[in-house]
Image (cartoon, rainbow, N blue to C red):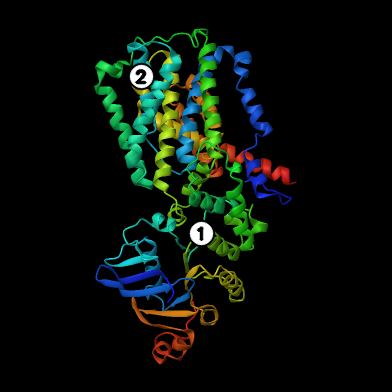
Amino acid sequence: MTAIALETRGLSRNFGSLAVSRDINLSLPVGARYALIGPNGAGKTTLINLMTGLLQPNAGQILLGGEDITQLEPQARVKRGLARTFQINTLFAGLNPLEAVTLAVCERRGIADRFWQNIAVNKDAIEEAYEILAKLKLGDVCYQTTRELPYGRQRLLEIALALATKPKVLLLDEPAAGVPQEESGDIFEVVAGLSNELTLLFIEHDMHVVFRFATHIIVLVGGAVFTEGSPAQISADPGVREVYLGKRHHG
Amino acid sequence: MSQMSAPTNPQAYLQSLSRWRPIEIVFWLATLLPFFLFPDYLSLASQIAIAALFALSLDLILGYAGVVSLGHAAFFGIGAYSAGIFSKLVWGEPLTGLVVAAILAGLVGYASSFIVSRFRHLTLIMITLGLGLLLHEAANRAHWLTGGSDGLQGVSIWPVLGLFKFDLYGYTAYGYALAALFICFLAVRRITNSPFGLALRGIRENWVRMPAIGAASRAHIRKAYTIAAVIAGIAGAVLAQTTETVSLESISFQRSADVLVMLVLGGAGRLYGGLVGSVIFMIARDQFSGIAPQYWYFWIGILLVMVVMFLPNGIVGGLSKITARWRRK
């Protein structure tokens, strides 16, 4: 039995009378590659917001590595190894990738409050940032202002920023959202190449991508877990076909 | 951001961003010119240096961290009154007075930073405005301590280091104000090139992303706000010591608004913006008020509207854009 990296117990959240998350019980084993799928409005992003602390649940618990993190602030969860990316680019538009990732590395190392030293003396942090960028094929654009980067590169920078926090669990909210289909494979190749010790949960609409990269699939419908299982189980499930795959809806 | 043509190593690149550029050296050498070229304008020059120091302090929170304040004169005023009252109650030695004023302004800044760091946008503007008005009225009411609307009288400052007496022509005043400005500038310059400075820019660029990379933005803002309050306090103290009086104007809304105008004119978030803005603002005020004393804000108003419409990054931002384009050719 493998250790559980991230677990939710009876997680629920309402917006007024609308239940956007209903009694969600999930557990992600260490090193898993989980896909979270479901029609638009199923509450996928809400679930990630609950896990990362941008939203507080009305009921239930979130456990990271067996520890209850339900009450922790978002940045405290990041410090414990739970990172995320955003469906809509949430980057530092006026910084370049090197500065942005160096900032994230400095925050993780706890040296971002040093106002008395030149940033350039932190050689290790800068090198670490550059290595992350190089790994995500951003080395050649790392001095260009983020807002001037091609969109696909910006999506990769989303992942680079999350990786700089050295997460144990990484939640990817549609990492290839808005990227032309022929390029989205490139982004998922990068995702697939991440360390095996990293536990991944990603939201994705493109079923080819999901079946190719996920080891396990969770289907969310109307804020509740409809079913979960291996890709083979999910693709054979007639109920899933009906609510989701049957529509052949991409986007 | 400067464009690097050849790929350099990342550390050398970051190092290069903090290197002194020739234009900076020219700028600081030019600040010495008033001693030789305009000896009649040394008291104006020291007013400019004080305004520049105050604008530099606002730049740290507004230009770098994106924390808008409409009540920054609170700290300027606390510094001014502290230095003035210190000289009356304790002694007239200027440097100790400066340190006391910096500490007191910093303490009030630190205390208010717990409120300020929790809010953004309009709420924040109203809170800083409210705190500023509150302190202004407190200074007005505490007539026994501050002299209220009559101003603080009887301030007497000893010679700087026991050597340089504050003279009528303003040689010492300008030298003293310029030294304070330069030392604080070096400190702010180092801060903006530090990991902390990068974190402040991160807050400005994306408040939402910061917690997602594990950053404690509020703690950063508290620290920046306190440092800014210390520098504003020093600016106020220099004004009190060089003019040997403190008026209610030093803690007024007008001063908070003026410093914001200076910073925006020059360009926020670029270190020299507040400096250049205060030079333009103060000289314009001096010249225009000579023509029509009551209406000089008319011209400042026009200038401000033109700059924000056509140079969104201020005058320094506009200039650096032009030189960057020229260099690329």
Name which residue lies at 43% across and 15% down: B241
Three-letter amino acid code at disc 2? Ser
- Up the image or down, A69 lies above or below A236; here it is above
- Up the image or down, A241 lies above or below B57; here it is below
Q: Nearer the viewer, residue B8 or B39?
A: B8
- Tell me which corner region of the image, top left, top right, bottom left or bottom right, holds residue A15: bottom left
Q: Nearer the viewer, residue B82 or A62?
A: A62
- Up the image or down, A225 lies above or below A134; here it is below
Name which residue lies at 41% across and 13% down: B244
Q: Position of residue A98 (x, y in %)?
A: 60, 52
Three-letter amino acid code at disc 1? Lys
Secondary structure at badge 1 equals loop
Q: Position of residue B266 (x, y in %)?
A: 54, 35
Which residue has dot 1 on it?
A166
Instruction: From the viewer's perspective, tell me whether residue B328 is left or right of residue B220.
Output: right
Q: Position of residue A17 (x, y in %)?
A: 24, 71
Q: Nearer the viewer, mark 2 or mark 1?
A: 1
Which residue has dot 2 on it?
B247
Name which residue lies at 63% across and 13% down: B36
Q: Is residue A145 at all visible to an observer of this figure?
A: no
Q: Nearer the viewer, residue B50 or A204?
A: A204
Q: Report, in whole angstroms, how far the alpha carbon at label 2 lies from the one at label 1.
A: 54 Å
Secondary structure at badge 2 equals loop
Q: Is residue B94 at all visible to an observer of this figure?
A: yes
Q: Which mark is residue A104?
A: none
Instruction: From the viewer's perspective, tell me whether residue A65 is left or right of residue A145.
Output: left
Tell me if mark 1 has few (under 14), some (14-19) or many (20+) residues whose alpha carbon lies within 10 angstroms of its own.
Answer: many
